Image (tube, rainbow, N blue to C red):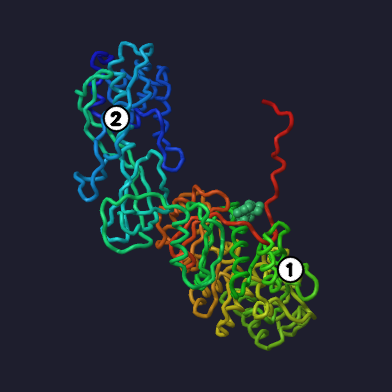
Amino acid sequence: MPASPARPARCSAMNATVSEMPPAMDLSCTSRDGADEGERSKRIRYLRSPDDTAGATKAISTLRWTGRCSQNWSIYGAASGRSRGQHEQAPGWPTLSDRPRPGNSSGPGPRAVARPIAPRVWRWDSSSVNVESGLGSQVESFREARRNLEASVLPLATSLDGRQFSFQASLHGLQFQAGGYAVLDDGGTPRLGQVITLDLDQLSAEVTLPTHPGGAPENRTQVPIRYAHGEGTILEGDAAPFHDVLVRAAAGAEVQAWLERSARPNAKLRLGDLTLAAGVPCLADAGGFDRHTFLCGQSGSGKTYSLGVILERLLIETDLRLVILDPNSDFVRLGKVRGAADPVLAKRYQEAARGVAVYSADAPGKRRLRLHAAEIDPATQAAALRLDPIADREEYAALADLLASQSPPTLEALSGSDHPQARRLGLRVRNLGIDRFTVWAPGETGSVLDAVHDQDARCVVIDLGSLPTREEQSLTAGAVLGDLWRRRQERRPVLIVIDEAHNVCPADPPDQLVAQAAEHAIRIAAEGRKFGLYLLVATQRPQKIAGNVLSQADNLVLMRLNSLADTAFTQAAFSFVPPSLIDRAVTFHQGEALIAGKISPQPALLRFGTRITEEGGADVPATWAAARSEQIR
Ligand SMILES: Nc1ncnc2c1ncn2[C@@H]1O[C@H](COP(=O)(O)OP(=O)(O)O)[C@@H](O)[C@H]1O
Ligand SMILES: [Mg+2]
């Protein structure tokens, strides 16, 4: 039965579930980051049209079902859609008056008190007041009370150790974001901090509300106050604890100044701009590339484009050699500057680009991507022949003998051999089509492996995408990685870049040849660093590459992920990066990333800048989806 309109504010729902009421009563949805609030917004939406009895009834049933509303409240809610007041200005109540003095707070948790709020006047539109206006006015009073209290939450921070801090802030005009920067100002030297987590929180305050519009406060009720609560890291400042220090979003210039003060004396790679500090460039520490780097993001997130930005900057700003395994021919124009590139940068790049050498299957002369069987390690050759050292022990042994004889025999020699195992090997070569691999270079001198070790070749792009078969690609990748490992004692620093690395070192290799390449990658990941062999592997999902490669990465460049399973996996693999920042990857747009590790000692959110060179394989444009001039509506 309907509750009595005479005493609607005393309805049992208000008393029984008062702490749960705000989501139900609120006609707007609160979100920290603009994302849908899911279930909560659904409930709110039902209550958006209080004139709609059916909608309200549905809302009430939802609320009741979820335990958020009692019988009395539901009946009232369904029947009293028009009990709405209009407020041009808020009443002078209920504000919990003066701002607390720092260090003199009372009560647990953040204080929902502070900024004096300009007195405002509550005015009713009498035409919209029905018999239940008494309750309606109380509901409006309740809302107004909450609005004022929520707007009064002071931005205050506390730190117990001077290294990390907790803070609270009003949701009205919220300026903070996880990953963004904050200034903690106690009146002395301001400290710069980084917001690491940001959550919506809630506490209840007891207030006394008037029963009638303009009446004296007489009904005590709990008002839930929602506010932002976060944690952060202090980037700079004395390591002394502090309490109730005012906190505000940092200006771009403040972040920039800190970056300049804290920079190490290495070359800086300008990768783009910080997403949460206006106008501040993101400068990666080039010295950090002496660790392995993992670049991850779903297809289309901008990995290859951004990888290009990183490589261009490494070429311009450092002397580090690059060997790039390029499965999709994306970097074949790494030596070619775009017409629209900034002229100063373009000039500098052109200097560096002289050392870019691209090896493709269809290139003429010296730049043809080619290998000699004799250069390939026995294990990789056996893998190409699909020889198992146990199951095919005789053939395997024959192959080992032949390779040990210094001059590997031709297919003709194998086929015409007196030795039955050699003839079997010949058959294998023919049946598997290995003799027809375009990568072989009979009669030619030199191979891509020479370039890999040529110290004058500043950047060697190995265009695996130009090879016609997956087997040739795996063979070449394995040969390059195996050779780099074999000559590790030369201790010459080189960054080995593997785009779409799940093809070269997958978690679950589909065949022996890939397994062989993966084994080389794993060995380099585990022990290559001290020999100057650094990896930069890019892939779509962290689970897709060999765990032993992933676990050795000290740098993370994380682009958009669209699966929570992927963020969870990344969080587990990169426990030095705050999980809350990795969580942000599901909200990234194309070209946005989180960068962390030695290349960015403080995790940073960035938007990658523009490439200097032309892309080899931009996406096929979606012109097929252009709107027609005439369209069915
Ligand atoms: N920062 C960026 N600025 C401009 N275009 C970009 C940017 N990042 C990616 N793109 C474009 O988006 C498309 C997909 O990017 P790509 O790097 O190939 O993604 P992924 O390697 O993650 O699949 C490409 O056409 C590329 O040109
Ligand atoms: Mg790509």
Q: Which mark is residue 145?
A: 2
Q: Position of residue 586 (x, y in %)?
A: 49, 49
Gap between marks 1 and 2 measured at Cα:
71 Å
Residue ID at (49%, 71%): 291
Residue shown at 71%/56% (left/top)? 340
Marks 1 and 2, the one that precedes in the sequence: 2
Q: Which of 85 and 256 lies nearest the eye of the viewer?
A: 256
* Dot 1 alpha-carbon crowd within 10 angstroms: few under 14, some 14 to 19, many 20 or more: many
List x then y, in percent, for residue 530: 49, 79
Say whether residue 33 is left or right of residue 364. Answer: left
Which image quadrant for residue 206?
top left
Q: Is residue 381 in sight in this rendering? A: yes
Can residue 547 be seen in the rendering of this structure? no
Which residue is label 1 attached to?
360
Q: Quadrant of residue 571?
A: bottom left
Query: Where is the N terminus found, in terms of image quarters?
Result: top left
Q: Secondary structure at mark 1?
A: loop
- In the rendering, at what x and y percent does residue 411 appear? 76, 78
Is residue 202 shown left or right of residue 37? left
